[in-house]
Amino acid sequence: MSASAFSGATAATFAEAEGAARRRLGLAGYVACFKGIVWREILRYLHQRERFLSALVRPLIWLFIFAAGFRQTLGVSIIPPYETYVLYEEFIAPGLIAMILLFNAMQSSLSMVYDRETGTMRTLLVSPFPRSFLLLSKLLGGVSVALLQSFAFLFVAYWWGIQPPPITEVKLFTFYDPPTWAGTAIEKMSDPIVNTLFSVPTFVQPFLGYLTVIPAIILAGLMLGALALFISSVIKQLENFAGVMNFVIFPMFFASSALYPLWRVREASPLLYEICRLNPFTYAVELIRFALYGQVDTISLAVIVGCTVLFLAAAVFAYNPSKGLIARRGGPGGSA
Amino acid sequence: MTATDPQLGHAEKDKTPALVVNGVSHSFGDKKVLDNVSLTVEQGAFVMLLGLNGAGKSTLFSLITRLYDNVSGQITIRGFDVRRKPSQALQRLGVVFQSRTLDVDLTLMQNLKYHAALHGFSRSDATQRAKLALEMIGLADRAGEKVRALSGGQLRRVEIARSMMHRPDLLLLDEPTVGLDLGSREGVIKIVRELVAKEHLGVLWATHLMDEVLRTDQVVILHHGVVLYNGGVPQLLSQTGTTSVREAFRALTGTKASIEEAA
């Protein structure tokens, strides 16, 4: 244990010239930093077996028990992207993937807020890279974990018989039903517009849905992660996960198209229908649903891209310890 | 930083202090935690920041590490303002936080490589630096072990090694020896003191343990957010007419209670 050995070696081996220090903050440095943050999230996740299991068990309970029970009571008619009648299990699978994203987003954002003054977030925040970049990398690290969880779920669902159909063409699907409060200001579309983007080589057709769902999961996960970070930074009352469950996760999940098609909701309550359509989570579900069938839902994509940009900006502002809302009220854990 | 950056490449000749804190005040709500605090850490200097719990040491560290914006006053690291040029300032800063900040589920190597990535080092460079860092603290043979398996003193040594991986000019340590047994404490102190001597970096060491002060150190006494003394140990003793730093501290702050008890 000798410090002199270190310093001798460092002087010789590192030979840190001015250029090297400058390069570290260049593009290669950003890439290294991003990879380091994402890789750490994945490593941590893989080391916490109970977290992995609980993340998998939750959607599977919905799938095996809830969906099986509701299969007979709730008939799903043929609505896009489905071209045949589908089992209820198949209908709620995209909603359950979105639920995985939502849970993961809330969990990691809460820990980011509570770790802010102690522990690992402080180590992250003394990195010389811009804070917005660090937070975005951290959110994408969380999304990577959610992506792993989603595929673990899809893998089990596959053996349960829930498989996306073979896809011959990737299509762009556009349909918008203007909200009732808009009156006649927005013209009603009579039929969806479907454009074929490209045809798919035969050998990827059987599993293409698993590939096209990846960008949808990443985008939806990022939106929910940013929203969760913003909410948990702003609302101090969300101090434990129970509060988050009651006031964020349940309302978002139930007032969406995750468990029932929205036309059914409209039959029950036009007001609730409009609420569901204001819920960004609905668009996350629909983007994933269409992506599993090799289709891009234009409206959902537009809503999610817009919301992601908005929520990211809000989250970075609210979370930034030096300027944001936490600093103004003295932090969740008070100040040392 | 630009190609004309004067701070790099001329480090030997450049006398810019490692840290300058100038007239910094900070409040939480109505409570003023720091009141017009100024101090300087020269290159190669070992500065002891003495204060009881709640004196404002941690807040000062939060401001230097830019966890909060310093609302009034100025903080520069090697001449770079932490508010205006945070990248350049933070690149030259190494920190050992009071709370444990290693991932206990990951290995030592994984922890150190993560830190290197945060400073933009490539994978191969990160591996090399991590190995050297572990050699420096005598834990090279345990690189593949999980951090959970380490003792408190070893954890601290890993954190110190980690804070040195990017070769900072300024090292901040917030109560680094709290909770360690006597042997581990001495090990930690020895490592840091050796580093200062060899690497010529400035150290700001916050503590309430007065026996960690050497006669050659610069001492800053912080009490209720106000700097009561800033200077060398001999002057401190003669000014207060005392024979030990502990007595001098009590004389200045008017605290009767034993410093150690306050921990």
Image: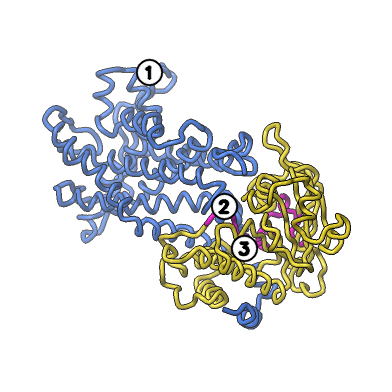
Rendered position, A261 above or below B182: above
State which mark lies toward you, 2 or 3. Answer: 2
Q: Earlier in the sequence, mark 2 or mark 3?
A: 3
Q: Name the residue rendered at 55%, 40% in the picture.
A: A333
- Image colour for chain B is yellow
Which residue is label 3 attached to?
A25
- As drawn, the chain in blue is A
Rendered position, A168 above or below A273: below
Between A25 and B229, which is closer to the camera in this rendering?
A: B229
Magenta-highlighted residues: B76-100
| Amino acid type shown at disc 3 | Leu
Rendered position, B113 above or below A86: below
Chain letter behind tag 1: A
Q: Name the residue rendered at 57%, 49% in the picture.
A: A132
Task: Give the CA separation, mark 2 to mark 3.
Answer: 19 Å
Q: Which mark is residue A122?
A: 2
Are the residues flagged by discs 3 and 1 in contact, CB closer than 8 Å? Answer: no
In reply to whether residue A314 is colored magenta, the answer given is: no
Which residue is label 1 attached to?
A180
